[in-house]
Structure formats: structure tokens, C-alpha cells
Image (tube, grey):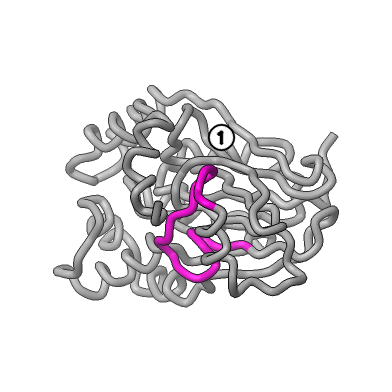
Amino acid sequence: MTDTAAVAVLSDIHGVAPALEAVLAEPDVRAARTVVLTGDLLSGPLPRETLALLRGLGDRAVWLRGNGERELAACHENRDAPAPDTVTPWAARQLTAADVAELAALPTAVTLDVPGLGPVLFCHATPRDDVEVVLADSRAERFAEVLAGVPEAVRTVVCGHTHMPFVRIAQGRLVVNPGSVGMPYGRDGAHWALLGPGGGAVALRRTPYDRAAACARIVAESGFPEAAAWAEEYVRHTCTAEEALAVFGPLDGR
């Protein structure tokens, strides 16, 4: 049974429109009163298609800016701007100036009241930075650092960025990462989260979809020159949790 008071959280879509379509078709997402988009939405092979799908959410959507949006804006303004990969500058060129201005103006964090949880702070990576890394096994001292500026009344923080879903208690707060819709690490499928009564307070969700068909669509519809290789690496293949932790672990200050 769906609950219209629930809040769906979608993060790190990375322009993988087929994965997003699968999540948007979920009954709990269709019924949710709010869909929070916690950044890194379009930097991938189908940015325009992904943007159209997200705009279709209308007033239900709460958009946040991640490092992906910041980098898209920088690459759109300056073709020689530093970029984390080859798809970001390409994706930036697929967007209009108005699109990019809208993305650049998004907030980096928002606090919403969620039934069953009270005030919840949503951000991309951490409340204070859009690329800072915290993981399920990060040290207590690390969480104390990144949560230091969060108001006392906020007892739940939702973040993304690492593409690795988790729920843990840190510094007396519930910290939730919904994982990635478009580039999941750990196991395949499109990952997201449901908050509120309909999700039993917090529920990590995984939506399976046809990844082979998604790769074929990306190759057919994306003009990105490296679309086939990108789809193979990030859509057909799923990075293991162990591989991801080997890269992210040193970035959390351990």
C-alpha cells in the first residue's frame, strides 16, 4: 500500500534515462508527495532526456545541486574548464544556457519535514561540501566533523555522492545514502530511498531494469562519442562495493 505522505529520494542519476524511467514507474515514487533530487542528475549520456523526465515531476520535485551540476555549469561557460571525465563537458554542450543557469542556481541543501522523521536535511555529499566523502564505515570522528554545523533539531541527514547505499547512526543522527539511480556501486539495479510512513521511516529501495536494453538505447540515442564504452562500464557492469571502497576509503580521512 502506497503512502502519499512519503518522500522519495533519487540521487546520482548521471543522465541514465532508462534507469530513471524504471524508478519513476515505481508505485511508491508515483504516489510520493515529494521527490527529492540530491544532485549529479545529468552528467551522463542522455542529459536532455533525463532533464525532461525530471521536469515532468513538476512541483513534486525538490532539486539540489551536486558537484555534477557545478561542473556542468563550469564546462558550459568555459570549454577548457577542468572536468572529472569526458562525458561532463559533452553533456554540458547538450544543455541550453537557460538549463545551465537553472542548475547553477539550485540550492546545495534543503531541510524538509518528513512524517515519522521530523526535520530532515538533504544534501549531495555532506552538508558542508559537494564532494566530501562519508561512508557506512567512516570513523565517528569523521561524522562529527561533517555534521558539526547541522542544527540540533535535525536528527536525519540524507546524502548521496558515493553511489553506495547505507543507513547508520552517527553522532546521534540517522544518516542515509540512497545510492545511485544511474551508476550503482555494490549491486546492480537503480537505487533510491523512501522516507516516511510508507517506507517504515527509512527504506532503501532497488529497482531492477533491463540493463542490456538500456545500453543499446544509450548507444542508439546518445551522441556522446564514447557512449558504447561508457554504457558498458557504468550500466552493464556494476562496480563492486569492495572496488568502490578501495577508491573512496582514502578520501574520508581515514
Name the amino acid type tagged 1: Ala
Point out the image quarter for the N terminus. top right
Residue at the location (51% across, 62% down)?
Answer: 126
Residue at the location (55% across, 26% down)?
Answer: 208
Does the magenta portion include 129?
A: yes
Q: Which residues are magenta?
A: 122-139
Residue at the location (76% across, 65% down)?
Answer: 119
Against 135, residue 146 (above or below) is below
Does the magenta portion include 236?
A: no
State the image coordinates of residue 178 (x, y, percent, origin top left): 58, 45
Query: Quarter-wise, where is residue 127 in the image?
Result: bottom right
State the image coordinates of residue 165 (x, y, percent, origin top left): 55, 40
Relative to 197, is 25 on the left or the right?
left
Relative to 207, is 29 on the left or the right?
right
Q: Secondary structure at mark 1?
A: helix
Against 191, residue 104 (above or below) is below
Count of picture labels? 1
State the image coordinates of residue 57 (x, y, percent, origin top left): 62, 55
Mark 1 crowd level (few <14, some 14–19, many ≥20, 10 Å Cα): some
Residue at the location (44% across, 41% down)?
Answer: 182
Query: Quarter-wise, where is residue 192 in the image?
Result: top right
Q: Which sits in the foreground, 10 or 25? A: 10
State the image coordinates of residue 18 (x, y, percent, origin top left): 46, 36
Against 202, residue 58 (above or below) is below
Residue under label 1, please give it. Answer: 22
Q: Main secondary structure of the magenta part?
A: loop
